[in-house]
Image: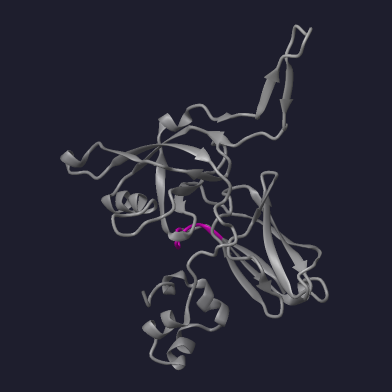
Amino acid sequence: MSSIAPFPDMGPVPRVELVVDPGDLLTDTVTVDFERRAEDRTFKVRGGMSRSATTTAVVMDYEAPFQIESVYSARCMDEDGAYMGTVTLDATTLAFGGTVIQQPFDPKLAVEVVRLAAMAGPVRQSTPGDLVRTENSGLPTLIGTGIRGGVEGFTLAVRTDTLAAYRALQATLGTYEQPQLQAWLIRTPPPILLPRVFFCAAPSLDAIERTLHFGEERVEFTAVVTEIEPPAPGLSPAVLRYSDLVALFDSYSDIAATYTLYSDILRDQSLVGAAG
């Protein structure tokens, strides 16, 4: 039996767990693509593409929106990769009230931040089109696609309250020795006017220390960001490897003594990357 469960904690980020039983899929399904629909938009679930339908699939959705309903579905493919149909799995709401900024390709690079009043600035979206004047017409004709664009040039203004959080936010965009994609996933709850799932280009980040000389650790950040498509949605985040288990456990007996089910191992994100 399939289940959809929300986990509203920073472990490493608020997330939704999908456990999908092959019996809940269409007959003769060989592979599935998992999708999430929320706020009138459909997203591919990162790490949930081209999954085998022969065994129970356990997928963590690290990009689910906060405090609105998400409906999950499975696109079913046969042995030739042909689309057979879509099965609606279930719906859930991730009840998290904060603001989280994370690196799309690595949810461990994430931090909960405090929104500042300056973040209440204008949210601009444009609809592409051109005004063309035709002969003998006093008014121009609008030629456009009718597809509205994403958020452009939004000024993000947030605060971290510890130096550890300051360093974590900086690391989401890379360090001197560890490069990262210059992009963020920002998730905010209603009624913030940004999209609940907001992927954006973040080419630069300004940090302003406010209280360090008073013995406190508050740092304010500003960045001008522009909405983008989810970067490489077929690319999975860091996943658990056999070498990670070898690095942490001496035997299968030790693993069995710690975890009751195999799915319990997959849920424990603290294991990921243990082997380096």
Kindly identify the residue that appears in the image at 54 percent across and 36 percent down. Answer: 192
Task: Tell me: residue 273, above or below residue 202.
Answer: below
Q: Quadrant of the C terminus?
A: bottom left
Q: What percent of the width, then of the height, locates residue 111?
A: 40, 52
Tell me: 28 left or right of 129.
Answer: right
- Count the marks: how many? 0
Q: Is residue 59 magenta?
A: no
Q: Relative to 171, is 36 on the left or the right?
A: right
> Residue 189: where, in percent of width, then height?
54, 43
Which residues, given as a range, are shown in magenta? 10-15
Q: How is the image coloured?
A: one colour
Comparing 152 with 60, the one in front is 152
Image position of 167 (left or right of 142): left
Which x, y percent locates residue 213? 16, 39
Occupied quadrant, residue 115: top left
Look at 76% across and 14% down and name the residue there.
134
Q: Quadrant of residue 207?
A: top left
Query: Is residue 7 in view?
Result: no
Name of the residue lying farthest toward the front: 135
Q: Position of residue 74 (x, y in %)?
A: 73, 64
The N terminus: image quadrant: bottom right
Foreground of the two, 253 or 239 = 239
| Main secondary-structure element of the magenta-colored stretch | loop
In the image shown, does 108 or 199 lie closer to the viewer?
A: 199
Does any portion of residue 196 appear in the rendered image? yes
Report the front residue among 235 and 107: 235
Identity of the residue drawn at 44% across and 72% down: 272
Check the image and report above or below for 164 versus 272: above
| Vertical relation: 218 (above or below) 7 | above
